[in-house]
Image (spheres, rainbow, N blue to C red):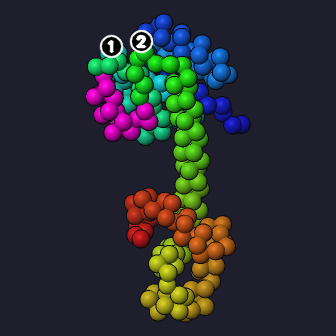
Amino acid sequence: MKQEPTVFIIDDDEAVRDSLKMLMKSVGQTVEAFSSPAEFLEVYDENRPGCIVLDIRMPGMSGLELQSKLNEMHCILPIIFITGHGDVPMAVQAIKDGAMNFIQKPFRDQELLDLINDALKLDTQQRKELLEHKEILRRLSTLTDREREVLHHVVEGKANKVIAADINLSQRTVEIHRSRVMEKMGTKSLAHLVRQVMQVKEHLEGEFNFKI
């Protein structure tokens, strides 16, 4: 069952938490609020979609420290930082470290809602791409070593005859391997096959010793 996205609010100020929760509920948005980064980390689930609205200054673990921790955990939830005037340089650094945006106190409700809507759209798109990547990698893992070798040459744009000469096989055998590659990868066109491989390019060398 598809999970509804959640806005995760992390702020040590109870009044701010309550105000933001009421704002989210007023527009029908699922919301959960936490008084500290540690409290959020206790229940964090990478499979839950949404975004994070995060205060930059908090006692104990700061918002920036939480961002660093989430980056280490490969969290893809977009982060919107809440900052005071003096925190803007830190917020700019947070953007460089992957935060989606920051909003300065005091802010208008609609301004924050617009940022949250953009963040939720980004999270949806990123999760879709992540699922596609995982499926492509799963399909690649079903290829034999020889099929992977043929795929490498196919992606380079070589004709079957050239591939056959390069890897010392008959052209007919290359055609069979190529057909099996296309079937296992779930594609009927060379253009689609190349696009699939390019989507997961960064994973291939490490996981499959496959260079493009």
> Which quadrant of the figure contains the N terminus?
top right
Q: Which residue is mark 1?
A: 59
Give the answer, above or below, for where 75 lies relative to 188: above
Q: Crowding at label 1, few (<14), some or many (≥20) Cα neighbours within 10 Å?
A: few
In the picture provided, is 88 more to the left or to the right than 192? left
* Residue nearest the observer in this picture, 30 or 66: 30
Give the answer, above or below, for where 52 lies relative to 150: above
Q: Which residue is mark 2?
A: 12
Report the Cα–Cα distance between label 1 and label 2: 8 Å
The amino acid type found where label 2 is placed reads Asp
User: Where does residue 178 sit, x and y in percent of width and height?
Assistant: 59, 80
Give the answer, above or below, for where 13 lies relative to 138: above
* Mark 1 or mark 2, earlier in chain: 2
* Residue nearest the observer in this picture, 98 or 36: 98
In the picture provided, is 44 more to the left or to the right than 84? right
User: Where does residue 154 sit, x and y in percent of width and height?
Assistant: 52, 79
Task: Indicate the secondary structure of the residue bearing disc 2.
Answer: loop
Q: Specify whether residue 161 is painted magenta.
A: no
Q: Which span is picked out in magenta?
A: 87-101
The amino acid type found where label 1 is placed reads Pro
For the point 50% across and 19% down, which residue is it? 108
In the picture provided, is 76 more to the left or to the right than 104? right
For residue 176, what is the image quadrant? bottom right
Q: Kindly identify which numbered label has been placed on residue 75.
A: none
For the point 60% across and 69% down, which residue is it? 192
